[in-house]
Image (spheres, coloured by chain):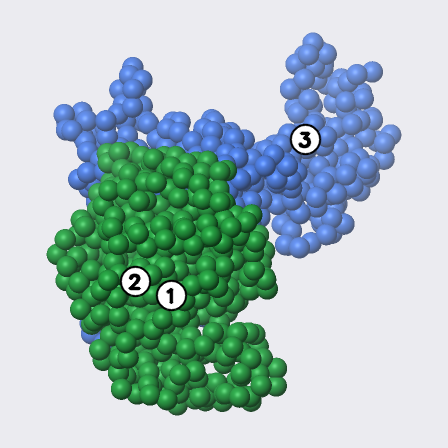
Chain colours: A green, B blue
């Protein structure tokens, strides 16, 4: 299985002509097609002929366009792709074929990477189980009775099963990290403004972030190098130049202070999850890092702050799907979409905006200050991604409030705007993956990737694969 | 108003499309009126497509500030764009990007011949698409043209300072003149490049508080109609108030055929636009230096020009104002006035001739040509100064009363004496030469 290897290995093999992009694409498409019936990780798979034409023309080039040249990947269906269906997981956009490309997709195209298909997700990113999709609910490849996490669930599955080498997810309140953790892969939520949002179907504009998902921190670094940077089409991208993230991933752990925020390990956390993340902290200590207990007391308000802001912005961003364009009327929204639109509309209404939206904005400032204070004491924070491992299918669907609480550890990161790297940290007794997140200062992506890489040098959780699904992968 | 029972309470909201090269938040051409076809100047951003993001047009921001400075406004050094939500088919995002509580400009003033009008605020927003209700293949349909969608639109809001229909007209006209003079807007009223709205209500003359209702007059596409509509509305409201009727908030249009306003929409309740800062657009910081740079780019404005012309060239501001339509024209006429002065001819006569249409000049002409045309029209053969002096002396002798009055400071009799002298002269005289000679004779 070629796609089980790292991007840099694939790059080397491609350059030495040991393998071809045509072979990679053929393997990717056959794996994706076979497993999609069971796992529903793709909403759209591209036509084989178009893929092979693209791959062979890339194979024929003398000089690679970038280090991702000829590598197959997938996109969460939230990214606009010219001439390719873009649904955001919703029936509202079930026939929307954009006439333009999202910046992140354009950059990957220019880099010579090959899009295999568009991944399943919770409609408009509303949800963290991938069950709120208007297409078939996606399944966890480690146990198909369980959710893959969400909202970028399809992307996490495609990487876990090696149907693609990497994917681009979108994280508004945990949507990259949550499924990465539940499917046993690595995912990076970048600093707000590090990667262009142009062409990403908006959920909550001040929280949305575009990031890579892959098998390892090393792979993430390579992808980030291609996609990061200012974009004239997105006024919120940072002018600060991006960095050579993949150039030197080694770091001296003896110089690193890791903070354990105690509120992230308090009541409500599953004992297995807690034990796995604390074991990861111990691994770092053995590698020479200093551990420091820190506190973010405002965490208890984070759900309220996040959802006041996210729903307000969502109600505004989704106002364009008013039934006049795109062919579907407003009743095509999911229950979860409607809950968030109604909640946000209420929170922005005259007479209530002061109590909800404006108070949440003030509280957001307090939270940003708390994180700034904590980062004076440590370089990164180490925390669980979700309080529990992947739930069983249907378990959360009928309990909208519990699903919000699942986001407790992830949403503050978006509210504050800092980066967070989710990487595999172990398995439960029932063989469900559990991840951890390393949270950094603004624009500390390089440092996070180095620290994540250090862990992946010492452990092999990230190399583990789910049981075989589908029939066409016995090469 | 024919009697003194009620006085007018009136403020205006004027929308003007800026003539930037590109639209407000995307790179599409800003050319809504001369597009070959509907919907050709569009992109994912101005069509509000999923994933489209706005990027603010800096020129439109600078021009808004330029207008604000020209109207003596305070500029907010930190400003932002907000989303204003409402549902309408010509609004593809379901919200309009506008400015709510931090407009670029606040607290200015425009002085007109009919009185001053305070400016409450000037903000920048995006225009909507244009709906066309028409019949296609026998079916009644509504079509949308988004060529106009996303065009930069400034809104200038006044305080309720307008005291008469003529005052409203003077304000609106002068505002248009300034916009054109600053070269930031075409103000094509027919096409909707400038849209006038007047909020009109009446209050008993002895009261000071604002009335509890206001009538919004909309869809007025000429200054004359504005004046007529306000006038009509004052009479209609007075009749209603005198009949003991309670007037309510409502929007009325102007029917220029029947010469009357008509009800368009009554507001049941205040709309809830759910304003909040647009998270796609970072706040805009305007440092002092930037504002100073814009300030320095503002040319001398017509109101200042005509005062200077009056001092420098004795040109009556009434005649000067219509000539000060652009900085280019100001420069042109300065040149003309200087040439005439050097030849001891009257710039004011020229300005008056142009004002009274006694002299017509073509566009894009030169100063030399204007001077030549003026001199030809007046055929100002220089008079023999001896002959002129003897005629003057004869006229002064005959009108010793007038001379005495003049010497006692009643200088207005100069006109009368001028007339008498001119009557005696056979050839077409140069008034300036006559005036100079007469002045000299009177003071010696």
Please identify the quarter of the rendering in which residue B277 is found: top left
**Circles 1 and 2: CB distance less than 8 Å?**
yes
Between disc 1 and disc 3, the foreground one is 1
Q: Which residue is drawn at 42% across and 63% down?
A: A459
Q: Which of A375 and B75 is in front in this view?
A: A375
Is A377 drawn above or below residue A218 in the view shown?
Answer: above
Q: Which mark is residue B190?
A: none
Q: Mark 1 lies on which chain?
A: A
C-alpha span from label 2 to label 3: 85 Å
Q: Nearer the viewer, residue A202 or B150?
A: A202
At numbered mark 2, what does the secondary structure look like: helix, strand or loop? strand
Asked whether residue B311 is in view, the answer is yes
Return the x and y of residue B131 as percentages of the image width and height.
31, 60
At numbered mark 3, what does the secondary structure look like: helix, strand or loop? helix
Between disc 2 and disc 3, the foreground one is 2
**Circles 2 and 3: CB distance less than 8 Å?**
no
Q: Name the residue under label 1.
A: A461
Q: Name the residue under label 3.
A: B308
Q: Residues within 10 Å of mark 2 (few under 14, many from 20)?
A: some
In the figure, is residue B417 to the left or right of B253? Answer: right
């Amino acid at each position: 299985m070629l796609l089980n290897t790292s991007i840099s290995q694939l790059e080397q093999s491609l350059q030495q002509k040991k393998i071809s992009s045509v072979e990679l694409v053929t393997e990717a498409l056959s794996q994706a097609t076979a497993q999609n019936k069971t796992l529903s990780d793709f909403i759209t798979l591209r036509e084989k002929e178009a893929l092979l034409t693209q791959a062979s023309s890339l194979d024929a080039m003398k000089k690679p366009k970038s280090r991702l040249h000829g590598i197959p990947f997938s996109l969460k269906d939230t990214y606009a792709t010219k001439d390719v269906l873009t649904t955001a997981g919703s029936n509202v956009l079930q026939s929307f074929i954009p006439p333009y490309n999202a910046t992140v997709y354009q950059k990957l195209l220019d880099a010579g990477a090959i899009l295999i298909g568009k991944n399943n997700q919770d409609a408009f990113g509303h949800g963290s189980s991938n069950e709120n999709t208007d297409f078939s609910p996606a399944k966890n490849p480690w146990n198909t009775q369980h959710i893959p996490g969400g909202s970028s669930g399809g992307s996490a599955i495609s990487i876990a099963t090696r149907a693609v080498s990497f994917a681009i997810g979108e994280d508004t309140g945990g949507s990259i990290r949550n499924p990465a953790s539940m499917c046993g892969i690595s995912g990076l939520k970048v600093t707000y403004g590090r990667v262009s949002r142009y062409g990403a179907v908006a959920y909550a504009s001040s929280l949305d972030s575009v990031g890579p998902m892959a098998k390892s921190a090393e792979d993430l670094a390579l992808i980030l190098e291609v996609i990061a940077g200012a974009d004239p089409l997105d006024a919120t991208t940072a002018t600060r130049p991006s960095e050579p993230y993949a150039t030197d991933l080694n770091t001296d752990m003896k110089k690193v202070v890791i903070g354990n925020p105690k509120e992230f390990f308090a009541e409500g956390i599953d004992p297995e999850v807690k034990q796995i993340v604390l074991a990861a902290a111990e691994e770092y200590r053995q590698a020479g890092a200093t551990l420091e207990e820190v506190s973010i007391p405002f965490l208890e308000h984070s759900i309220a702050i996040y959802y006041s802001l996210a729903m307000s912005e969502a109600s505004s961003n989704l106002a364009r799907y008013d039934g006049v364009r795109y062919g579907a009327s407003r009743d095509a929204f999911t229950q979860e979409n409607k809950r968030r639109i109604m909640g946000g509309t209420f929170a922005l209404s005259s007479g209530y905006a002061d109590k909800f939206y404006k108070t949440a904005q003030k509280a957001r400032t307090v939270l940003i200050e708390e994180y700034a204070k904590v980062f004076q004491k440590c370089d990164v924070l180490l925390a669980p991604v979700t309080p529990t491992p992947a739930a069983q299918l249907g378990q959360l669907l009928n309990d909208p409030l519990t699903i919000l609480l699942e986001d407790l550890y992830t949403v503050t990161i978006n509210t504050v705007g800092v980066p967070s790297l989710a990487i595999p940290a172990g398995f439960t007794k029932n063989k469900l993956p559990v991840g951890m997140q390393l949270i950094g200062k603004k624009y500390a992506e390089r440092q996070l990737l180095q620290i994540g890489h250090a862990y992946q040098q010492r452990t092999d959780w990230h190399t583990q694969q789910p049981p075989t699904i589908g029939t066409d992968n016995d090469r | 108003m024919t009697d003194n029972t009620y006085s007018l309470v009136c403020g205006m909201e004027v929308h003007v499309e800026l003539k930037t090269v590109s639209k407000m938040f995307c790179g599409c051409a800003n050319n809504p009126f001369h597009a070959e076809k509907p919907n050709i100047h569009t992109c994912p951003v101005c069509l509000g497509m999923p994933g489209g993001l706005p990027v603010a047009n800096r020129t439109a921001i600078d021009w808004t500030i330029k207008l604000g400075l020209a109207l003596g406004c305070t500029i907010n050094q930190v400003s932002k764009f907000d989303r204003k939500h409402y549902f309408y088919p010509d609004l593809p995002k379901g919200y309009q990007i506008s400015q709510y509580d931090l407009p670029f400009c606040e607290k200015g003033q425009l002085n007109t011949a009919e009185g001053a009008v305070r400016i409450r605020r000037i903000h920048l927003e995006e225009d909507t698409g244009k709906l066309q209700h028409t019949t296609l293949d026998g079916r009644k349909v509504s079509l949308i043209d988004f060529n106009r969608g996303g065009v930069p639109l400034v809104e200038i809001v006044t305080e309720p300072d307008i005291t008469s229909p003529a005052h409203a007209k003077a304000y609106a006209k002068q505002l248009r003149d300034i916009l054109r003079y600053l070269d930031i807007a075409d103000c094509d009223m027919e096409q909707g490049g400038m849209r006038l709205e007047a909020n009109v209500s009446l209050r008993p003359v002895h009261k000071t508080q604002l009335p509890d209702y206001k009538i919004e007059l909309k869809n007025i596409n000429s200054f004359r109609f504005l004046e007529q509509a306000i006038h009509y509305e004052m009479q209609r409201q007075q009749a209603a108030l005198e009949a003991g009727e309670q007037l309510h908030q409502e929007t009325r249009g102007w029917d220029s055929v029947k010469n009357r306003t008509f009800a368009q929409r009554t507001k049941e309740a205040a709309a809830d636009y759910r304003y909040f800062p647009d998270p796609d657009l970072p706040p805009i910081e305007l440092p002092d230096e930037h504002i100073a740079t814009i300030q320095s780019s503002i040319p001398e404005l017509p109101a200042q020009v005509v005062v200077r012309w009056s001092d420098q060239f004795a040109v009556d501001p009434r005649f000067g104002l219509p000539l000060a339509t652009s900085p280019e024209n100001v420069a042109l006429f300065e040149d003309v006035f200087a040439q005439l002065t050097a030849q001891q001819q009257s710039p004011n006569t020229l300005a008056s001739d142009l004002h009274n249409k006694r002299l017509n000049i073509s566009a894009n002409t030169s100063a030399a040509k204007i001077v030549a045309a003026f001199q030809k029209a007046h055929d100002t053969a220089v008079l023999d100064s001896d002959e002129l002096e003897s005629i003057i002396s004869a006229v002064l002798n005959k009108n010793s009363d007038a001379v005495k009055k003049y010497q006692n400071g009643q200088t207005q009799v100069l006109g009368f004496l001028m007339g008498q002298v001119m009557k005696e002269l056979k050839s077409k005289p140069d008034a300036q030469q006559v005036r100079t000679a007469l002045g000299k004779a009177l003071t010696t």
